[in-house]
Image (cartoon, rainbow, N blue to C red):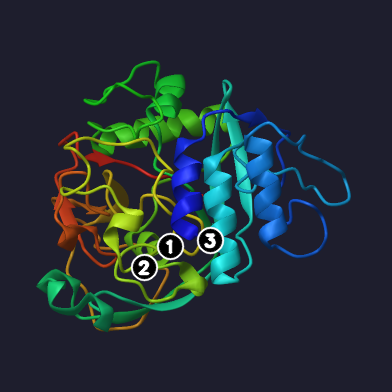
Amino acid sequence: MKKFFLNLAIALLPLASVAQTQGVYGDVNGDGVVDGNDLNDVINIVLGKLVPASTPTHLVNGDVNGDGVVDGIDINELINIILDKTEPSSTQTFTVNGVSFTMVDVEGGSFTMGATPEQGSDAEINESPAHQVTLSSFSIGQTEVTQELWLTVMGSNPSWFKDDIQRPVEFVNWDECQEFITKLNEITGKSFRLPTEAEWEYAARGGNKSQGFKYSGSNNIDEVAWYSENSGSKTHAVGIKAPNELGLYDMSGNVYEWCQDWYGDYSADAQTNPTGAASGNYRVGRSGSWGSGTGYCRVSARSDLAPTGASARVGLRLAL
């Protein structure tokens, strides 16, 4: 049944515009629970058979992920909420020159970072020693930064794969990402940034909702990632695969994502809000890409990337 609705979500084309909400509730019909009735309502909204409701009391309208439209992503999000029986994460949606993007709030907590048991023999030496990390709350992009958002902020699209501006932007080096973020902050008045490596891994693992998956959101990589065996050697529009426990998409595969940190060796010491090495020659890249094997798409997998280098395999995700 889950597979049927996920396939339906991808196939559905009609989109219904709705008012932006503050947060994600999942309780579409306002009856106090998130269940199959809410899922049916969203499907009917997408098919154009039901007008979405929006009231000051419930702030419910079918736009489960708060991106301004009711579509297949909302169906996927509801399925994830219902099957996992977890409360959906709250979000903030921002609009720049008509282009909207969503940040997901991640509640702080502690986790074991690095080569944890579920990573098995695929774990590399640079993921050890596993160590305890405690993080404050933060927000992270629900998806990778799209070509559409980069284009509206920077005025150009550097990507190699340009067929669909809903694909992640790529061919951007670390320094260019910093320039993009500076301009985005000037427009929005916010303080967007790249995530730290620890924040990235905590979010990829599902934060305090983690179910201990090897990849971000599943032990079955095909459910959550575009990688070498299913990508067709190209990027894909963000948000098509299933999300992880926090409602984050493509944290395994599609494109590598720059982190703020200099790349360095791990320490066995427990840390609070770590920011990586004090200096170095490489920045951290996470998630694997459309051209990566399964090992590089794991939640603990790390890569060292030259900050001045650009590749069709590397993009970014925002933090706040």
* Residue position marked by numbered label 3 in the rendering: 80
N-term-proximal mark, 2 vs 1: 1
Mark drawn on residue 274: 2
Secondary structure category for the residue under label 1: helix
Side (left or right) of 4 relative to 194: right
Please determine whether, in this image, residue 202 is positioned above or below residue 128. Answer: above
Q: Amino acid at mark 1?
A: Ala
Give 225 or 41, whichever is nearer the viewer: 41
Q: Quadrant of residue 145?
A: top left
Please determine whether, in this image, residue 187 is positioned above or below residue 295. Answer: above
Separation of residues labelled 3 and 1 (CA atoms): 16 Å
Residue lying at the far top of the rendered structure: 155
**Position in image of residue 44 (x %, y %):** 68, 40
Point 15% across, 36% down: residue: 309
Q: Amino acid at mark 2?
A: Pro
Side (left or right) of 167 relative to 187: left
Q: Nearer the viewer, mark 2 or mark 1?
A: 1
Side (left or right) of 193 relative to 118: right
Give 244 or 92, whichever is nearer the viewer: 244
Point 18% across, 79% down: residue: 120
Q: Is residue 268 visible?
A: yes
Q: How would you rate the neighbour count of disc 2 (Cα within 10 Å): few for under 14, some for 14-19, many for 20 or more?
A: some
